[in-house]
Amino acid sequence: MADVGATVIRVREESDLDDLEGLLIPGGESTTISLLAQRSGLFDPIRTLVSDGIPVYGSCAGMIMLSDRVLDGREDRPSFGGIDIAVRRNAFGRQVDSFEADVVMPVIPGDPFPAVFIRAPWVEETTDSVEVLARVADPGSPGRIVAVRQGRLFATSFHPELTPDRRVHQYFLQIVKGDA
């Protein structure tokens, strides 16, 4: 995010959350993120920030952590919630099933975005309050939902940080600044 003009603060303790203008929840493993947030005392403060309306972007596992419903998650590893979606973890398959695909996102001008999917979730259900920003082709479906926005909350099931293209991060920065 620093390469798009944001000041980056690594959140390791509750005081790191003070005065944030936005929060990025990265990819990784959602049950581990939940566990570490609980053990470090960050779970409830982050959940409060999300519900209070701070701009938050979640990529891959971050999407899972921002979803209100995780269809195949563990009950002892809750999400922060905030986006009225149901996601399926590892929906595209295992690590060996990782892939890249060009994704068209009308909110991102220019060419399709080169998305990297690694054990990625997809969105199975949304409500009218959620804006679907992108889908990716999947045989036998109208395209799987891979990017959503609800108010100041934004999530993708892919990893934009693994490409040199910074348009997704620039879009989130626009959300933080109130320009999108």
Image (tube, rainbow, N blue to C red):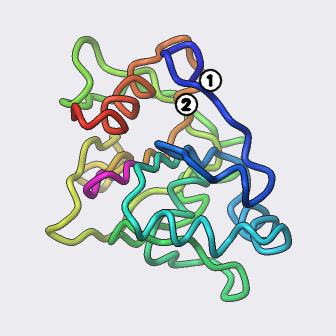
> Does label 1 or label 2 sit earlier along the sequence?
2
The label shown at residue 67 is none
User: Which amino acid, mark 2?
Assistant: Val
Residue at figure coordinates x 44%, y 21% from the top left: 114
8 in magenta: no
Horizontally, residue 95 falls left or right of residue 122, namely: right
Q: Do the residues labelled 1 and 2 touch (CB within 8 Å)?
A: yes
Where residue 10 appears, as percent x and y from the top left, is 73, 39
User: Which amino acid, mark 1?
Assistant: Leu
Residue at image mark 1? 162
Q: How far apart are marks 1 and 2 (CA)?
A: 7 Å
Give the foreground label among 1 and 2: 1
Which image quadrant: the C terminus? top left
Front residue of 167 and 152: 152
Label 1's element?
Answer: helix
153 in magenta: yes
**Mark 2: few/some/many CA within 10 Å (<14, 14-19, 20+):** many
Q: Magenta part mainly helix, strand or loop?
A: strand
The label shown at residue 116 is 2
Residue 153 versus residue 112 in the image, above or below = below
Front residue of 79 and 99: 79
Horizontally, residue 126 falls left or right of residue 8, namely: left
Residue 13 versus residue 156 in the image, above or below = below
Where residue 97 appears, as percent x and y from the top left, is 64, 42
Where residue 28 appears, as percent x and y from the top left, is 72, 49
Label 2's element?
Answer: strand
Which image quadrant: the N terminus? top right
The magenta stretch is: 149-154
Residue at figure coordinates x 35%, y 69% from the top left: 85
**Mark 1: few/some/many CA within 10 Å (<14, 14-19, 20+):** few
